[in-house]
Amino acid sequence: MLPDETIVAIATPLGEGGLAVLRLSGAHAFAIADKCFSPVGKSSLKPSAAPTHTIQYGKIIRDGNVIDEVLLAVLRAPRTFTREDTVEISCHGGILPAKLVLDTLLTNGARLAEPGEFTKRAFLNGRIDLAQAEAVADVIHSRTELALAAANEQLAGKLSQRINKLRDDLMLTLAHVEAHIDFPDEDISPDTKEKLLQRLEDGISFMDELLRTANEGQILRRGIRAAIIGRPNAGKSSLLNQLLGRDRAIVSPIAGTTRDTIEETANIRGLPVIFIDTAGLREARDEIEVEGIRRSRESLASAEFILHVLDASEPLTSADEIYLKEFADKKRILVCNKTDLPVKLEVRSQNSEVRMVDVCSLSGNGIENLKDAIKSLVWAGEIKAEMLQVAINSRHQEALNRARFTARQATDALRDGMTLELVAMDLRIAANAVGEIVGKTTTEDLLDSIFSAFCIGK
């Protein structure tokens, strides 16, 4: 990425709609926009002449022809998302108008932005740190209000503030240790040593607190996968439709209707749960059913928990017993369906901790109880606002694990009176690992890995 390059991209999803927005950012944004934009009306101005944070009305012109009628926003640095001069053009929605406006800007000197390049520039220009940059993607991909709340807390810098405090404490301890290395004739006094050890222990305790949020943070960001399994005609597809609140899967009294896996995400008490409706488990009767059951097995292997649907209107079969034993080690909820009919099912779970929930997927009775059971299974305790502020992702988790390991080594070495050079080396590694979270210590490969997952235009 060259700092003097001006980049452009369509910032709204492609397709037919009322509006499409194109974002142009960089040192030559106004000059490029001047070449394409023709003001209409006495009060409209060329972008280079317009005051910052104003809207200009006009037309995009290419080779003397009008491409589209637009509104153009002028945003002067540094009060922009990237801290660069920025132009945002609102044209008519639809693939063709947006593409023609984009081609016009490219022809006049702009370069097509790479995925996440606007946010990357915001980070490199100091507007946001790396944790906040990741939160931009989390906001876009949020599938529940809780996930959005967690992303907004991180975007506001709540996690960054705590990470920066942790890094500052590690750096302060490192400075004390290095000062004593520079003056070897002066031993660390017992009081000073105790204060350094206490600061390190407090830092390790805080890292433990953050690491405990890793599971919840990943659930909010990517959701948790739940496979719905059971014999054919147990009511798996009807259950999926009830959990989604709409008819997604085909429901039929004919056993074996579902031949392929169906994946849909539902908001379960604020948590994004990806439900996978699978083909009924039984001996396959044709090649299509063989493939459907194979895919069901694959889904089971990747699911974090299962909803095992049993037909309460029938006695437990030998097949049911086989599957109950087969999935005994899997985190699961036993769902006794068809409770509107005379109940003939008796289930004796060998694991007393396995939750059983009675439902009627035809009427919806018991579905709310099932949602409560799902939430309790995947998220222990109450969902608190302060937990959302520091829900870390997998990258943060990996960096904190490295930081905690070396901080613990430094603490033990200091307490045992080992050479201070070793203590300083471990502290420096710990501080750098913590700094990776907010981008104070980065590599180009790390940045490429993070921003390549963004959409173009953001």
Image: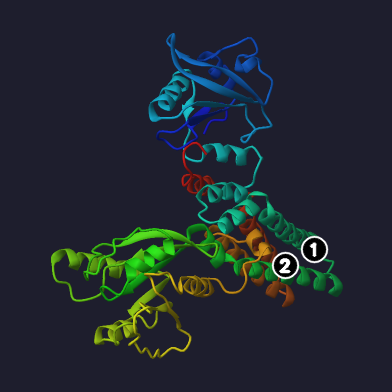
Tag 1 near tag 2, CB within 8 Å? yes
Q: Which residue is mark 2?
A: 420
Q: Helix, strand or loop at disc 2?
A: helix
Q: Which residue is mark 1?
A: 180
Quick one: 284 or 62, which is closer to the camera?
A: 284
**First reached walking from the N terminus: tag 1 or tag 2:** 1
Q: How far, Cα to Cα, is label 1 from label 2?
A: 8 Å
Residue 280, numbered label: none
104 on left or right of 404: left
Residue 185 location in percent, x, y? 83, 66
Quick one: 347 or 33, which is closer to the camera?
A: 347
Amino acid beneath label 2: Leu
For label 2, the crowd category at 10 Å Cα-Cα, with few meaning under 14, some 14 to 19 and many 20 or more, is some
Residue 259 location in percent, x, y? 23, 64
Q: Residue at x 58, y 64 (%)?
A: 402
Q: Residue at x 45, y 25 (%)?
A: 102
